[in-house]
Image: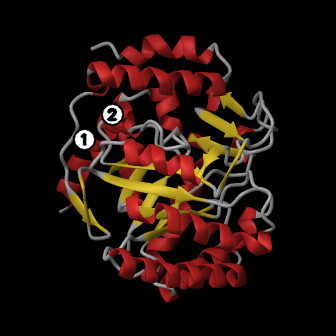
Amino acid sequence: MLNPYSLARPLLFALDPERAHELTLATIDRAAQTGMLRLAGGAPVDDPIEVMGMRFRNRVGLAAGLDKNGAHIDALAALGFGFIEVGTVTPKGQPGNPRPRMFRLPEADAVINRMGFNNDGVDVFMKNVARSGFNGVLGLNIGKNASTPIERATDDYLHCLERVYSRASYVTVNISSPNTKNLRQLQGADELDAMLAALRERQLGLADRHKRYVPLALKIAPDLDDAQIEAIAQKLRSHEIDAVIATNTTISRESVLGLRHAQEAGGLSGAPVRALSNRVIRALRALMPGGYPIIGVGGVMSGADACEKIDAGATLVQLYTGLVYRGPALVRECALALRAHCAAAR
C-alpha cells in the first residue's frame, strides 16, 4: 500500500525546513477536520498501559517541540499517538533565535535545530490548550525565557507550572535544550537540587489547591557522563520527581562529520542520537527503582528502534524527527511493534 507521505516528502524537502514544518501543521489541521488524517496514519493502536497513575492508550507519544504553542493538539492526536506533549512554553512570548535555525541532514536521517524556545508565551499557550477537545494524556512542557538570568530560572519554571497545572496530565521540566544560553547548567547537582526542591514544593501545593495530583517529569540531555547521570538519578529519587524523559537533542557531531550542515550550531536529533539516548536510558534504569517511569526519546525511526528503547529500560517512547523522515505511518508502526514486543516479553 502506498504511503501518502512518500509523495509529499519530496515537496516538503524542497522547502526550507521551518517553512515545511509550518505548512505541515496547517495541512494536518485541515486533514483532521475532513477525516483524511486517519487514513494517513491508520487506525489507532489500542495497547493500554498505566504509568504515573494515568492510562495511556499505547506506548507511543509525540515529543515536545513539534507543537510549541499547543495549537494543533486535536490534529496531532488523530495520528494515533498514545499521548501528546506540547511546548516548550515560556512565561513570556519570545521569537527564538534568528532564522535560518533548522537544517536537515538527509544522509543521516537527522535534523539540527537552534529554535531557542520560540513561542507565544504561556497565556496564549493555555488558551490554545483550553480550546482542544483532546481527552487523552497531555504533557505540557515548560522552560525559561532567554532574557531571564540563569540564577532566576526557577522563577520562570514556577510561573509556568502554576499556569499550566490545571490543564496538564503531566508537566515536563525542560532543562536540557542546548539552544538557550546556559540552560544545561541547571542539570548540575547543586542547581538541580535547588530547582527540584522548589518545583516539588509548588507541585504539592498545587495538588492541594486543585484537588488533583499532576506528575512532574524532568527532561535531560544525552551528553551526560556517568557521574552526571548518577547525580541526576539521586536528585530524582530524593525529590520524588515522578518521571524522567531521556533524552533531548545532542551537541555532538561525531556521527555526522563531513555532512552538509553538520557544523551548524544547535541540537542534533534523529538517528544519530539513538545510541546516546539509549545509553542514558540504560544507566537510569540501573540507578532508579524498578518500575520508575522513563520516557525514551531520540532516534526512533522504526518499530525496531522503539523496541530497542523499551529493551534499554524505557517505559514509553516519544517521536519527533522520525516523523519528518517517515511520516505519520511511523506512529502506528511503532505502536504495533511495541504491542507485540511487550506481549512476547511477558
- Relative to 103, residue 47 above or below: below
| SS category of the residue bearing label 1 | helix
- Relative to 150, residue 78 above or below: above
Give the left or right position of residue 263, taking residue 29 as reference. right
| SS category of the residue bearing label 2 | loop
User: Would residue 219 be seen by someone viewing this image from the given angle?
Assistant: no
Residue pictured at 57% horizontal, 59% vertical: 142
Residue pictured at 67% horizontal, 29% vertical: 105
Find residue 1 and report its image quarter. top left
Label located before the other in sequence (2 or 1): 2
Between 144 and 3, the residue placed more toward the observer is 144
Residue 79 has which mark? 2
Residue pictured at 60% horizontal, 74% vertical: 229
Q: Callout 1, which amino acid?
A: Leu
Give the left or right position of residue 2, taking residue 200 as reference. left
Q: Callout 2, which amino acid?
A: Leu
Residue 26 percent coordinates (x, y):
48, 23
Between 310 and 144, the residue placed more toward the observer is 144
User: Depth-wise, is mark 2 or mark 1 nearer the camera?
Assistant: 2
Residue 11 percent coordinates (x, y):
55, 11
Residue 264 has which mark? none
Residue linked to disc 1: 336
